[in-house]
Image (cartoon, rainbow, N blue to C red):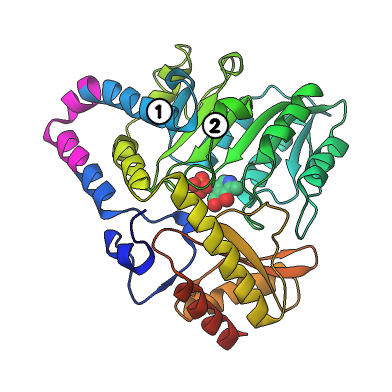
Amino acid sequence: MRALGEAIRDAFLIDPGACTVNHGSYGATPRAVLAEQDRWRGVMEAQTSRFFNRVLPGALREAAARLAAYVGAAAEDLAFVPNATTGVNAVLRSLALVPGDEILMLSHVYGAVRNTARYVAQQTGARLVEAALPWPRPDAAEMVASVGAAITPRTRIAVLDHITSPSAVVVPIAEMVALCHARDVRVLVDGAHAPGHVALDVGAIGADWYTGNAHKWLFAPKGCAFLHARREAQAGLHPAVISHGLGRGFVAEFDWTGTIDPTAYLAIGTALDFHASLGGTALMARNTLLAAEASARLAARLGTETGHGNGIGGAMATVRVPGSATAEVALALRGRLMDAGCDAPVHALGGALWLRISAQAYNAAADFERLGDILQGVL
Ligand SMILES: Cc1ncc(COP(=O)(O)O)c(C=O)c1O
């Protein structure tokens, strides 16, 4: 594996003066990937009509095929979307729900996804139900059981995070999907954090729909994500934006949703190559180890605990921080960290405050020592 940490930082545009330990929120795009995106911008702007009519349709499908092969899917079942939020909106807003139907989510669901479900519930008379994720240090079997306990005869869809946002838990997603299917519940997996973070095989997970971001852990430019729909789950599915492709099938509907800059999608091959050049699965394992060690060290410094254990961690980890566990206190602490030159999300979970760290290729143990210094100063 190539030398990582400080040795690789110059491959990114990251401010050397900042304490960058929050890859999970928005990712960081390597210079090489941005250069490939720029190259495509040049092709686009040289002859826009030719690009959109003649070049883009084929180039988009080629890019989709590369990404599909990486995530274990067939290219014709995968379409690009600008972000996971858009993927979630497409699925939830395509459902024909009736009053009393239930939308099941994990209690650690991402706020924007909860809002989307709430909006759909308001429009249709459906109800939101949350499965309480055990916390901290959840056990895989307990997590699956909490989903099972929340399913009722009215559950129409389960929206399950592959990796939770506030708590950074890698959930036993295949087991949860199997359980939901056994109980006749369709599943949308929100894999916003999964591609490039954990080994991903969308086909093996078997969800009806899976959306994931390439712009977080897979090094793609911002605005590069995908929606996968199993063949049987494509009927009745429409993008959040309706355009020329209406009624012409999954690929036609999703490949054109109006004029946008699609160059983030077209740079996916370079992003995948970059990820592989840093080790691919070895990089993911290295990041997971770094996050585990760094969170344990931070917890020791603070005299607290980590949220992880039981093998449910990935390249993000959480540490309990002292303070009263309200959303306002969490937001204020994150603000003070940002003022001090560092960013790390803080959430109130299970009666305590939890700080999330991310370990990506450009990070090393020293970054988290610096975070610890800043955090102790701020606290
Ligand atoms: C679990 C989860 N879902 C969805 C999203 C939304 O991602 P995006 O802003 O790329 O749509 C995030 C973002 O962090 C997330 O953590």
Task: Name the residue nearer the viewer: 234 or 271.
Answer: 271
The answer to whether 344 appears left or right of 252 in the picture is: right
Q: Quadrant of the C terminus?
A: bottom right
Residue 51 position, x and y percent, is 20, 27
Helix, strand or loop for disc 2? loop
Say which label, 1 or 2, has the lower sequence index: 2
Q: Residue at x 77, y 53 (%)?
A: 138
Question: What range is drawn magenta here?
Answer: 39-54
Q: Is residue 26 magenta?
A: no
Dot 1 beta carbon under 8 Å from ligand 1: no
Task: Name the residue nearer the viewer: 185 or 308.
Answer: 308
How packed is label 1: few (under 14 Cα within 10 Å), some, or many (20 or more)?
Answer: some
Q: Which residue is mark 2?
A: 201
Q: Is residue 123 above or below residue 307?
A: above
Q: Is residue 180 above or below residue 345?
A: above
Q: Is residue 271 above or below residue 174?
A: below
Dot label at residue 24: none
Dot label at residue 257: 1
Residue 103 position, x and y percent, is 75, 34
Q: Amino acid at mark 2?
A: Asp
Write down the quadrant of residue 231 in the picture. Answer: top right
Residue 20 position, x and y percent, is 43, 68
Write down the quadrant of residue 141 in the picture. Answer: top right
Q: Residue at x 39, y 62 (%)?
A: 362
Q: Is residue 52 magenta?
A: yes
Residue 186 position, x and y percent, is 71, 25
How packed is label 2: few (under 14 Cα within 10 Å), some, or many (20 or more)?
Answer: some
The answer to whether 270 appears left or right of 332 in the picture is: left
Q: Amino acid at mark 1?
A: Thr
